[in-house]
Image (tube, helix red, strand yellow):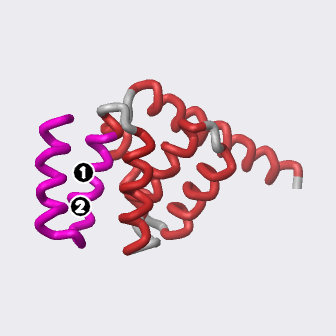
Amino acid sequence: APGVYQLASLLVELDTSDEASRILCADALYQMGCVEDAHKLLLLALSGNPQRSPILARLALLQLKKGFMYDGNQLLKKVIRIGDTSCLLPIMDIFKDEDRKLMQTHCHFRALTILKDKQED
């Protein structure tokens, strides 16, 4: 992760508008345990394009990791509304095991809650 971070940082310096390099930087920071720095970098990337599902999904995980369930839910809803959920599976490979389980458990619980509410209606 440190080598990936250094390479991605250089790429960002060469082209500050390169979203892929920013995401790669954020993923490396996450892997190194620098969650707050990854969060800041993703927010910066999101400011350039607020409809990017890969960024929103990563931010959702970070919010859930911090215990901000409402914020994580809102970001996941936005990913679903955009309609580009294809980014979720590749991102799961990046997440650490504990965070992958957190995201899966959270999404499963929310899905069950939604289904239960619809059945009651």
The residue that disc 2 covers is 20
77 is higher (above) or lower (below) than 107: below
Q: Furthest-top residue in view?
A: 98
Residue at 23%, 61% (x, y): give it. 20
Displayed quadrant of residue 45: bottom left
Q: Give the side of residue 20 with respect to residue 104, left or right.
A: left
Of helix, strand and loop, which one carries label 1?
A: helix
Q: Give the side of residue 77 with respect to residue 90, left or right.
A: right
The residue that disc 1 covers is 24
Do the residues under discs 1 and 2 have CB atoms within 8 angstroms? Answer: yes
Residue at 46%, 72% (x, y): give it. 50
47 is higher (above) or lower (below) than 63: below
Residue 12 among those drawn in magenta = yes
- CA neighbours of label 1 inside 10 A, class few (<14), some (14 to 19), many (20+): many
Looking at the rendering, the stretch of residues picked out in magenta corresponds to 1-29
Give the label on residue 89, or none. none
Of helix, strand and loop, which one carries label 2?
A: helix
